[in-house]
Image (cartoon, grey):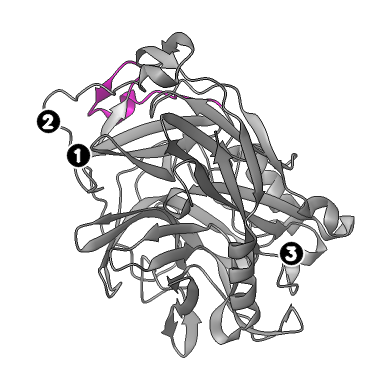
């Protein structure tokens, strides 16, 4: 499904939400690029491109799975209080746990300190917050649209704060040490572009990340950009990097799909589960092991199939595309912020990677909408868990993004806006 937006800022967001049921808002393209949870992409990667720049590589078709897929194991009975009917059959339903969520001051301060030391070529803010632990002990942060530049007294120095479509930020031993991006014709550009000779015309918004052997695999969204803030989401792509150098080995569009598969990943029971969305519906695929280029199996409502067209939704909760499912003990926790109209981050709890998940329970109310002047149009979005950062088996670190769709969206000079916030969530 093609989405081309070339309207005033306020209408950009309204159009995205009305047509897609969700999105990711940042600066730079009217009210900012939205990360779609749209039902469908163009008929094949590259559809809707109008520039004459080099096209990205040809689509890669995930090979079909061979042989019958093993059934998903239910959670151990010790954590359950009764039985219910899961999408895959009878499933033990875990009790509703007690959940607490408090600001993670350590991570908030880490990114505030680093962003406010902007030295011209370093990250000062971004959204689409993703992370992964690398085998050498580093933590890798991958942001979508991001500001670089200098900061003075908590304000981004403008002009001189370029917006690029993605960056890597390296954390080592609890310290953010480097921002990785590239240059084109002397100007900073994204670290990853589907078309390196046209990095401002074609973009890659990163999503789920998986370490596979000596490589890092990232499923993201291919985007084309036009004049007047117009952009088109053309589908999902798989970017592969060498480790430990983080050299880009390639970006390959995936076969066209009605789902956006960049939602989140979870490792469990010898599989890597991939979560996708289409409007308010959530879907699940999986691969054996941790190679995202291996054959995909899709959950069809009762089992697993190699037929992508047979994928069936497991949830109908709004996700704004950026969401996650994580295992905490014997409980599977679905974290999302379902609507732009609420400050609530919610959690649902299930007994398997495909659910059933109970009704969403509010776990945290983001305060930013009420702590900034009403005219600034501050919004929060993109709630996402980072399970590798939990400080105990019962904790999750959850991030959310802070942006603006009002007058502030045209400049976002305030460095506290367009920057993630972090929570420590305890499930007991």
Kindly identify the residue that appears in the image at 45 percent across and 9 percent down.
84
Give the dominant element type of the magenta stretch: helix, strand or loop: loop
Q: Secondary structure at mark 3?
A: helix
Q: Is residue 283 above or below residue 392?
A: above
Q: Are marks 1 and 3 in contact (CB under 8 Å)?
A: no
Lower sequence index among marks 1 and 2: 2
Residue bearing mark 1: 295
Instruction: Tell me the residue at 42%/23% (across/down).
Output: 351
Above-or-below relation of 268 to 367: above
Find disc 3 in the rendering and name its residue: 409
Query: Separation of disc 1 and disc 3 at Cα?
Result: 42 Å
**Mark 3 vs mark 2: which is more N-terminal?**
2
Per the image, the residue denoted by label 2 is 66
Which of pointers 1 and 3 lies earlier in the amino acid sequence?
Answer: 1
Look at the picture and state if 255 lies above or below 330: below
Q: How far is the residue under mark 3 from the one under mark 2?
A: 49 Å
> Could you tell me residue 125's position as x and y percent?
61, 70
Mark 1: few, some, or many residues within 10 Å (few <14, many ≥20)? some
Magenta part of the protein: which range? 300-316
Q: Position of residue 373 (x, y in %)?
A: 88, 59
Classed neighbour count for the residue bearing mark 2: other residues with Cα under 10 Å, few (<14), some (14–19), many (≥20): few
Question: x%, y% of residue 371?
Answer: 84, 56
Which sits in the foreground, 326 or 207? 326
């Amino acid at each position: 499904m093609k989405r081309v937006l070339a309207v005033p800022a306020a209408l950009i967001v309204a159009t995205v939400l009305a047509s897609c049921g969700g999105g990711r808002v940042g600066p730079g393209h009217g009210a900012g690029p939205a990360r779609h949870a749209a039902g469908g992409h163009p008929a094949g990667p590259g559809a809707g491109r109008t520039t004459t720049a080099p096209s990205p590589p040809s689509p890669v078709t995930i090979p079909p799975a061979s042989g019958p897929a093993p059934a998903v194991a239910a959670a151990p009975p010790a954590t359950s209080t009764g039985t219910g009917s899961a999408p895959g059959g009878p499933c033990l339903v875990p009790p509703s746990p007690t959940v607490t969520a408090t600001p993670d001051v350590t991570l908030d301060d880490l990114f505030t300190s680093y962003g406010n030391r902007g030295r011209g070529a370093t990250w000062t803010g971004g959204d689409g917050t993703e992370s992964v632990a690398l085998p050498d002990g580093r933590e890798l942060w991958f942001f979508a649209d991001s500001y670089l530049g200098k900061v003075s007294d908590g304000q981004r120095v403008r002009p001189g704060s370029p917006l690029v479509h993605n960056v890597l930020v390296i954390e080592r031993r609890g310290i953010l040490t480097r921002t990785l991006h590239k240059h084109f014709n002397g100007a900073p550009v994204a670290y990853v572009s589907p078309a390196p000779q046209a990095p401002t015309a074609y973009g890659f918004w990163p999503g789920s990340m998986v370490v596979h052997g000596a490589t890092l695999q990232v499923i993201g969204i291919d985007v084309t950009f036009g004049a007047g803030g117009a952009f088109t989401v053309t589908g999902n792509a798989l970017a592969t990097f060498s480790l430990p150098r983080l050299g880009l080995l390639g970006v390959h569009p995936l076969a066209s799909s009605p789902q956006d598969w960049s939602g989140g990943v979870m490792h469990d029971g010898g599989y890597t589960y991939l979560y996708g969305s289409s409007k308010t519906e959530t879907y699940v695929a999986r691969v054996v092991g941790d190679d995202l280029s291996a054959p995909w199996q899709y959950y069809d409502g009762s089992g697993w199939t190699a037929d992508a067209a047979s994928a069936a939704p497991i949830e109908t909760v709004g996700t704004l595309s950026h969401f996650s499912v994580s295992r905490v003990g014997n409980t599977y926790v679905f974290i999302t912020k379902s609507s732009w109209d609420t400050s609530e981050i919610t959690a649902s709890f299930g007994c398997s990677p495909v659910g059933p998940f109970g009704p969403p329970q509010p776990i945290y109310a983001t305060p930013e909408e009420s702590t900034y002047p009403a005219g600034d149009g501050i919004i929060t979005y993109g709630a996402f868990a980072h399970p590798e950062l939990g400080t105990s088996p019962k904790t999750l670190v959850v991030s959310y993004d802070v942006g603006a769709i009002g007058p502030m969206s045209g400049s976002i000079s305030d460095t506290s806006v367009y920057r993630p916030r972090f929570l420590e969530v305890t499930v007991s």
